[in-house]
Image (cartoon, rainbow, N blue to C red):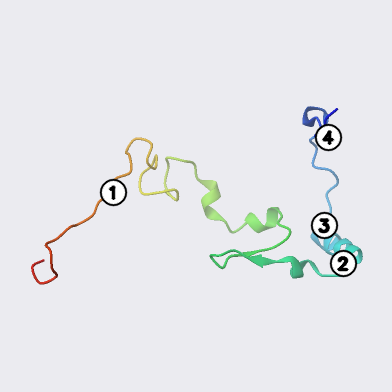
Amino acid sequence: MTRVPDFTRLPLDDGPVTARGDWSSAFLAETGQTPETLAWATPEEIDVRPLYGPDDLAQVDHLDGLPGLPPFVRGPYPTMYVGQPWTIRQYAGFSTAEES
């Protein structure tokens, strides 16, 4: 018998919906810390909170688009590099800056 659960038999419902304030209160009661203490920053200095919800996506405009249609947020081409392979370019001048 394996310790890995059979995910095909697990219910996939979202469970009970709780308000963010209720979750924060339960977190504080359980850990003695506020949820903000678990926030951390990525190497790019992007703050990551411990909990996100649907209201956090209200101001994210690019989620309304589709791949291949404007705005092209995934790259310079509608299909990114599917139909056009990456190119690597380098300018090689002369041997010295003066000669270039």
| Marks 1,2: beta carbons within 8 A | no
Q: Residue at x 63, y 55 (%)?
A: 57
Q: Earlier in the sequence, mark 2 or mark 3?
A: 3
x and y, in percent, of residue 54 in the image: 69, 53
Q: Which residue is mark 1?
A: 88
**Residue projecting furthest to the right:** 29
Residue assigned mark 4: 3
Q: Nearer the viewer, residue 97 or 78?
A: 97
Which label lies toward us, 1 or 2? 1
What's under tag 3, amino acid-wise?
Ala
Q: What residue does disc 2 label?
A: 28
* Crowd tier of the residue under label 4, counting other residues whose Cα lies within 10 Å: few below 14, some 14–19, many 20 or above: few
Q: Which amino acid does the dot numbered 2 rest on?
A: Leu
Q: Residue 7 location, x and y as percent?
A: 78, 31
Circle 3 sits on which residue? 19
User: Type of residue at label 4?
Assistant: Arg
Amino acid identity at mark 1: Ile
Q: Looking at the rendering, in which quadrant would you find the C terminus?
A: bottom left
Using the rendered view, name the quadrant where residue 1 is placed.
top right
Kindly identify the residue that appears in the image at 83 percent across and 49 percent down: 17
Label 1 secondary element: loop
In this view, the mark in front (2 or 4): 4
Choose the circle earlier in sequence order: 1 or 4. 4
